[in-house]
Image: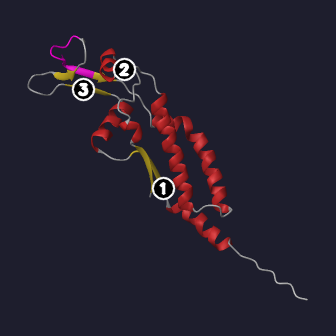
Amino acid sequence: MSVVIKDDNHIPEIIMQLEHLKDYHVRVGILGGGEIGMIAGVQEFGAHIVAKNPSGYLWIPTKGENGGKDGVLKLREVTIPERSFIRSTFAEKQGEWNTFAEKLIFEVANGSIGARMAYQRLGERMARDIRNKIKSTHSPANAPLTINNKGSSSPLIDTGRLRQSVTYEVI
């Protein structure tokens, strides 16, 4: 009588995946530029906007009766307060993200997932947390004119485009 023992040695594959962990990075946030990138920057850091056109005024569209003639309010400058949603989420969630990353490394070490998948899961988690921060931010409040124009008081949500633009990429 003979006994055959089959041993699938996955250690070389696992070592390779662990070594690949150093080959990747994850970028999270508003990764595109353009108008949405500009809006994100203004909200993240705040802005003081001064009219630079020949009239010397910013023309702010209005809805209803907000003191503006013909649905327009003329202002020489506007200050938009900082409403950090990326940096503040990093500060608040870094410990949780580190713990999650440790669990992902363990999954790579036991062969459950590959290195790239670990970064994808981390990126998904980070992007979700930033989107949740956008949804839960209520301070500083919008100006009454902005609330009237938007129809809501959520400072970081108007059309939802900013929140939908939060994404990640594994590089």
Amino acid type of disc 1? Answer: His
Viewer-proximal residue, 65 or 163? 65
* Residue under pointer 3: 49
The image quadrant of residue 154 is top left
Q: Residue 104 at what x, y percent from top left?
A: 62, 54
Which residue is located at x 63 percent, y 60 percent? Answer: 108
Q: Residues within 10 Å of mark 2 (few under 14, many from 20)?
A: some
Amino acid type of disc 3? Answer: Ile
Q: How many marks?
A: 3
Mark 3 lies on a secondary structure that is strand
Q: Residue 149 at what x, y percent from top left?
A: 29, 21
Q: Residue 49 colored magenta?
A: no
Viewer-proximal residue, 95 or 85? 85
Residue extending farthest to the bottom is: 1
Query: Is 13 drawn above or below residue 148 in the view shown?
Result: below
* Residue under pointer 2: 142
Q: Residues within 10 Å of mark 1 (few under 14, many from 20)?
A: some
The image quadrant of residue 56 is top left
Residue extending farthest to the left is: 54
Q: Mark 1–mark 3 contact, CB under 8 Å? A: no
Query: Magenta segment range?
Result: 67-78
Which color scheme does this rendered protein use? secondary structure
The answer to which of marks 3 and 2 sits earlier in the sequence is: 3
Q: Residue 49 at what x, y percent from top left?
A: 24, 26
Query: Is 79 drawn above or below residue 103 in the view shown?
Result: above
Residue extending farthest to the right is: 1
Circle number at residue 25: 1
Mark 2 lies on a secondary structure that is loop
Q: Residue 62 at what x, y percent from top left?
A: 23, 19
